[in-house]
Amino acid sequence: MATKQLTKIAKRADAGRILAHYAATLPFSALPDAVVRLTKQCILDTLGTTLAATTLAPQASLLHDYVREVGGSADSTLIGYGTKAPAQMAAFLNGANSHLLDYDDVGCAHVSVATVPVAFAVAEKVGKVSGRELLTAIALGMDIHTRLFPYESIDEWIRKHRFSSTQTLGYISGAAVAGRLSGLSEDRLYAALGLAYQQAAGAEQPHLMLSGWCCQSAVQAALLAKRGVPGVKDLLDGPNGLYQVYLRDLEPDPARLLGDLGTRFHALESHGFKAWPACGSNRRPVNCILDLRKEHGLQPADVKSIVVAGGELIMRLAEPLEEKRRPAASEQAKTSLPFTCAVAMIYGDVKLCHYTEAGLRDPKVLAMADRISAHKADSRVPSVTIEMSDGTQHQKQVVYPLGDDRQNPMSQQQIEDKFRDCAAYSEKQISDTDARQIIALVANLEEISDVREITRLL
C-alpha cells in the first residue's frame, strides 16, 4: 500500500480500520514472489499436519464425532475425513487438527494454523474462489498476525504474557482471511475484525486444539458481518483494544503494525517450518545431535551420556526428568527433551512413527533417554555435549536449526516429503497419485480457477 494512501487513511481511522482496508483491497499482484512461495509452502505443510492428525491425535476422533453430531449444511470439507460440515465447524475441526500434532510451522506464532484452515473452509462455502485469491487472503492474514505480534521473538512473549500468541491474535488474523474471501466491503470487514476481537481468548496452556477456537470464531465473525451485524471499534489501539487489554498497556509500534503495508511482510523475517514432529524448542538440540552423529560417525551403542545446556524453555522440556524420560502419551513425548533427543540419536531422524504407541515403547529409545539430561545455562542458544564410552566428548550449538527460513530453510523437496509422510496417516486414504496431485496443485495455485480442485482430494 502506498505511503500517501496509508497516511490519508490514517487521518480518518484507527489501526483496525487501516488493516480492514488493507485486507479488503490488497491485490495478488502486490505479493512479492518470496511471499507467494512461502504461502504455498505453508498451505502444503498445514494440509499435511491436518491429515496426519486424523489418526495420530487421540483428540481428533472426539472432535470429529462432535462436529458430526452438531450437523448442519455440507459447506466445507473436513480434511482427512472425506465429508463436509458447516464452514465454521469445518474451520474448527481442521484448525484444531492442524496443530494437534505440534508439527505445524513456527515463528512469532503458529500463523498458518490460524489462517489456512479458515481460508479453505470459507473458500468452499463461497465457491469458485481462485488460487490467486486464496493465496492473497492467506498471505495478508499471516502478515496481519505477525504485525500484531509486538516483539522480535516468541521467547519475549512467553516471558511477558500468559495468552497464546497463536490463538489470541488468530481471531483477528483469521477474520481478515475470512472477510476477504467472503468478499466483504471495507466497512463489513472492519466489523468482522471487531466481532472476532470480542471473542478473543487463549490462556497459554498445553492444549493443542487452541487453533480450532480462533478459526471457528473467525469464520463466524465474517458470516455475522456479512449480514450486517456490527462489531466493536478501536479494537487494536483503543482504550479497550487488544494492546490495552491483552498486552498489558503496551503501546503499539506504528511502524511495526502499519508500516509498509503490502510491501514488507514480517513472516519472511520470522517464519520457520518444523523438520521434526515435536515441540519447537526441541529443534536446536535435535539438530545438534543429528549433526554430531553425522560429522563424527557416532554410534548409539557407544554413547555414554548426552547433556543439553539451555534456558527456561529447554528446562521445561527436561523436567521432571524421570517423567520426561518415560512419556505416557504422544503429546507428552513431543514436549520431552530426553525422549525426542533419544530418537534422534538412535535413528538419525525424528518422524511421526516415533510418537505412535509402538514408538513410545521402543526399548532402544527408552534406554538412550536414560542417558540424556539437561542443566540450566545463561545462553539463549542451547548447546549439546555428547560423551562417548571412551571418554571423548563432542559439543555443538546450532543457532539456526533446519526449518529456520532466514538461514537454514527446508528445501521444497523436504516440505513435499513431509507432506507425503503426513498424508499416509490420513483417515481418508490419500493415494500416492492424489498426494502428487495435491502437491502439484498447490505448487501452481495461482493458475487454479477454483480451489475446490484441491479440497475434493482431501
Image (spheres, rainbow, N blue to C red):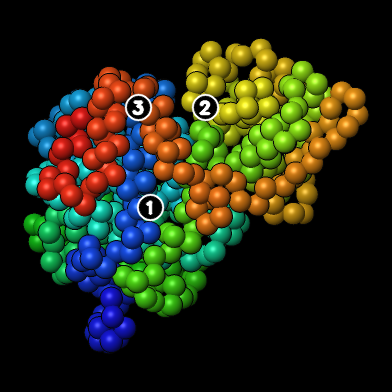
Work out how far the residue at label 2 is from the one at label 3, CA to CA, in angstroms: 13 Å
Residue at the location (74% across, 28% down)?
A: 297
Residue drawn at point x = 37 percent, y = 29 percent: 420
Using a 10 Å C-alpha cutoff, classify the residue at mark 1 as few (fewer than 14 neighbours), some (14 to 19) or many (20 or more): some
Residue 291: x %, y % from top left: 68, 38
1 up-or-down from 267: above or below: below
Position of 266 with respect to 288 (left or right) is left
Q: Considering the numbered disc 2 on the image, is that residue within a helix, a strand or a loop? A: loop
Helix or strand or loop: what does disc 3 sit on? Answer: helix
> Circle 2 sits on which residue?
351
Report which quarter residue 56 is drawn in.
top left
Say whether marks 1 and 3 touch (CB < 8 Å): no
Does label 2 or label 3 sit earlier along the sequence?
2
* Quadrant, the N terminus: bottom left
Measured in 3D between alpha carbons, the distance from the residue under mark 1 to the one under mark 3, in whole angstroms, is: 20 Å
Earlier-in-chain disc, 2 versus 1: 1
Can residue 168 be seen at all in this image of the molecule? yes
Residue 101: % across, % down: 45, 32
Residue highlighted by disc 1: 38
Vertical relation: 124 (above or below) 428: below
Q: Disc number at residue 404?
A: none
Query: 8 or 34: nearer the eye?
Result: 34
Three-letter code, disc 2: Lys
- Three-letter residue code for mark 3: Ala
Say which quarter of the image contains residue 84: top left
> For mark 3, what is the residue?
423
Q: What residue type is labelled 1?
A: Leu
Q: Which of marks 1 and 3 is nearer the N terminus?
A: 1
